[in-house]
Image (cartoon, rainbow, N blue to C red):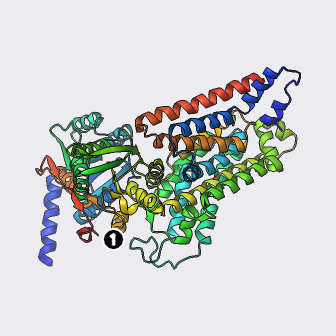
Amino acid sequence: MANTTASAEMLPTESSKQKQLKSLISKYGIYFAFIGLVIFMSAMHPAFLTVTNILNIIRQVTSIGLIALGVTIIIITRGIDLSSGSVLALVSVVAASLAQNPDWHAKMYPSLPALPVIVPILAALAIGSLCGAINGAFVAKTGIPPFIATLGMMIVARGAALIYSDGRPVSDLNDSYNFIGQGEIFGIPFPVILFIIMALISWILLNRTRFGKYAYSIGGNEQAAFVSGINVAKYKILVYTFGGFLAGMAGLVLSARISSGQPGLGNMFELDAIAAATIGGVSHAGGIGTIQGTVVGALIIGVLNNGLDLLNVSAYWQQIIKGSIIVAAVVFDMRKNARKN
Amino acid sequence: MKKLVSVFMTCCALFLAGCGAQQDDGKVKIGVSIASFNDTFLMYVKDAMEAKAKELGDVEIVYTDGKEDVTIQLSQVENFIAQGMDSIIVIPASTDATKPITNAALKADINLVYVNRRPDYLPEGSYYIGSEERVAGEMQARYVAEALGGKGNVGILMGPLGADNTNKRTDGVKGIVADYPDMQVTREQSGKWMRDMGLSILENWIASGDKMDAIISNNDDMALGAIAALEANGMKKDVMVVGLDATPDALAFMEEGRLDATIFQDSKGQGQASVDTAYKLAKKETVEKETMVPFKLVTPENFKDFL
């Protein structure tokens, strides 16, 4: 397994205590950066470190976080997925159209009876997975760069969302659907629970199954993976399908959160998700990256969005601060990787 | 009925004779470049354009999505010119960068109608239909100031930073707030027109614990997100929320008593007038250089007129 942790443990053990400390910092650099950011925000605003606000932060990054989990595995195989935000939008309008309250005046299908909530959920996950599978098939079977294949899907899915909804919001969704985005179980928001479960599943997939092992192998050295008998095409398609599945789930969560499916939703989310994965230490050279890193990367983005709002930092400056911190985090991470080699 | 048909036939004959140089099918061809297909309000303008075209009958319209990028719109206009459109309608993504579009159309001697957002550069041969964005923000703030008795903290939810209507609507709000010494804008943030972002921003503002009395949003969708956040925290009764556009979703919220006010921007009026003007220009009729379609304040008292 060409995992970061694996290679970090192979460092010479005879180094002095100072060196050990250095390697500890570099190995867990992003986690220290995250803790530092949290301490800073807590010191700056008393409301930051409260249960409500922490749940706010996680709830707000759920959609980007879900997408980031999928894109992590995709980047590990040396791919990229630019289509997730658009797929999210397409899923949101289709799922919403199947979950509208019967008495809404602008109902998309006026004669559609109230459907059990499982129907929009299955539709959403199926459409998301299908978009992902198409991405994967183009990448694996035609050999075009993943950037291009998923760029195409990004444009097509956004267009499909606009056509399906005729450019309008699909609103007034029923309560069982809204629960996906607004519900709580024992005081914990349902989207947060969903995100934790999906992060665990992604972690298990990546670390405890053949699927994950092969993903690392393909990203580490595709030729070697092929020669050693891995069905590279099949696993690439599976990796992209999983990414699409998660984008579909993000579409469900976001549309349920605002009780409305909208063709403009998720604009640029793919970039935030890629940023989260990259901050979390996923290498675009392939073969390197962890789910826990990506989760922290997503949380860093969430803490920045939330904390800068709390501190009432001007909207214009927020962009400059966010962009700088993202690049700084990755520079820090690059130095860590460079030192290892 | 027969008379009507014959009048119609005569009109057609006259029309065909009048402009023999035009397309064989005799239809007026109009190219429309819309700032963004993601903007719900602009889709209602497009609806009205389609309805007007159907009513006129002999019009053929091509719609393109400018994707919030004025350079994309320039290419679209160049294509319209190459396709020999009789008139071009543009809802510009930015009003500061329309000069190349205007000049290209004028140079090709094609009628150009701007809609919804007024460019500063509007030389002879170009026309404008729409409203004064700043006035909408002023109406919002005036309503809030009266309801709050001239004092309180206001948060502004803005559209995309740097967008023309964001700036003008926000300036309008701030201009009125400045007239009241006990009123201040305490927070402003961009929700990029999106409901989910309006919701997230309000969650953060609420978490900060700062006192807020009113949220004024540059559009309705962000206002509806704000309402969801306030309701989830049991604060809706203490904070008034004012949107802009009077979309069907917003009017439904108002019917349920959840939205305090919005501003009706006449999508129908703008869409119809734009096609009408472009059509008349193609037929060499004279039209007003600028047609103003006024905003209207929508409150729980009068919202039924806008459903």
- Could you say where residue A42 lies in the image, as x and y percent from the top left? 56, 40
Where's residue B237, x and y in %? 37, 63
Residue plotted at (47% across, 56% down) = A263
**Vertical position of residue B249 compared to residue A320: above or below:** below
- Quarter of the image that includes the N terminus of chain A: top right
Q: Element at badge 1?
A: helix
For residue A144, what is the image quadrant?
top right
Please give the name of the residue rendered at 47% of the width and 43% of the height, measured from the top-left corner: A310
Chain that bears disc 1: B
Q: Which residue is mark 1?
A: B255
Q: Is residue A167 visible?
A: no
Return the x and y of residue A213 as percentages of the image width and height: 82, 44
In the rendered image, which quarter is residue A285 located in?
Answer: top right
Which amino acid type is marked by label 1?
A: Glu
Q: Residue at x 63, y 65 (%)?
A: A185
Q: Rate crowding at label 1 as few (under 14), some (14 to 19) or many (20 or more) other CA atoms within 10 Å.
A: some
Q: Is residue B83 left or right of residue A144?
A: left
